[in-house]
Amino acid sequence: MSLKSCSVLLSGLLLWNLAALPARAESYQWPSQIPSPLKAPTDQSMGRLVKGAALQGGLLDLRFGQASVDVQGVGHILDWNNLSKFTLDGRACDAKALEKAVKDGKGLSVAVRYNPESGLIGWMDAVSGRPQASVVTRLSSTGILKPGDTLHVAVPASEAKRLKLQQAYLSVPGVCRQLRMKPHNGGFETEIPVLAGVQWRSLPLFIQSAAGKTFRGSTISISGRAPIITRFGPHKAEAGSIPCWVDYDGPAYLLEPGKTVVRVSPQAQISHLIHRPGRVHFWLSSDKPGLYTIEVKTTDKVGRQSTASWSLTIDEMPPTER
């Protein structure tokens, strides 16, 4: 077997093994009348809706028509072809440019839009840490954006003059491409509707000139869903110090640990409240047998709450353990 054939085989095995693992992606359904710069080429028109999927992660590999994206330590395999569009730091590029960057050891994060049924990439927008010409952008909000919000983006007149912008276009990885900004008081402005079904963290804004120059601006974060409690326990235990837990689904970085509330009825001591990705641990201490009700409420950085309540039956401690 030739070295080239061996390399292809090993890569194929790597991608196949990663493909067997699940990864967290977000599915969306948007009104079909959204502006065209917000639509990826793989978005499907289904009646009055536009459907697709999105994920954000690190680019592990890109070759042989497949891309491997790391999402919280899990590989997600997607396909690409001539329909797929790529960018690197706000500039249009081809797949070979990203492949070379990965081989050169440059860490790339990517925001991807794709067809969830075929796994075909529509947009893959990569961001590196390389130095880049900057632009001052003014945003209507610097917090985490949620569905229903509208983000207003402006390039002030002083920046438009400094950068000699005769026209300006806004691109945000995974969100929009070449959205034309309107002239306003010597500068430029535009608005982006924040739509449901995406989860983007610290995406940079890119402003492009009519001549093709690209400048990097502020970052934005968008949260289409809150961390939601999905499971909890235990439901039965012996008296004493009892380890309890709730599992949640959603982005761990959004939780506000200091705002997690645990209540128990009848009263019992709660201690050692510990937050971990996907789970909150705590201990309930009671020597009295009986039926207890536990309620846990979590709050995220946008103020969204999730609550779980369940019954815990505490039995007497066996005599040998008293």
Image (cartoon, rainbow, N blue to C red):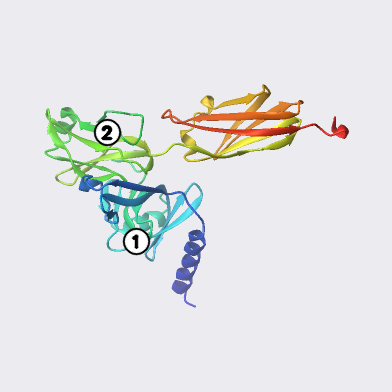
Residue at the right extreme?
320
Disc 1: CA contacts within 10 A as few (<14), some (14-19) or many (>=20): many
**Residue 221 drawn at (x, y percent):** 36, 36
Single out the mark in the foreground, 1 or 2: 2
Q: Secondary structure at mark 2?
A: strand
Image-quadrant location for residue 143 = top left
Q: Is residue 2 above or below residue 206?
A: below
Q: How many marks?
A: 2
Image-quadrant location for residue 285 = top right
Residue at the front extreme?
291
Residue located beneath label 1 in the image? 80
Residue located beneath label 2 in the image? 150
**Residue 145 drawn at (x, y percent):** 34, 33
Q: What mark, if any, has residue 136 been given in the picture?
A: none
Residue at the top extreme?
267
**C-alpha gap between disc 1 and disc 2:** 31 Å
Instruction: Judge from the rendering whether residue 1 lies leftward or rightward of residue 215; answer left or right.
Output: right
Disc 2: CA contacts within 10 A as few (<14), some (14-19) or many (>=20): some
- Whether residue 151 is visible to the viewer of this picture, yes or no, is yes
User: 8 and 53: which one is in front?
Assistant: 53
**Residue 9 drawn at (x, y percent):** 48, 70
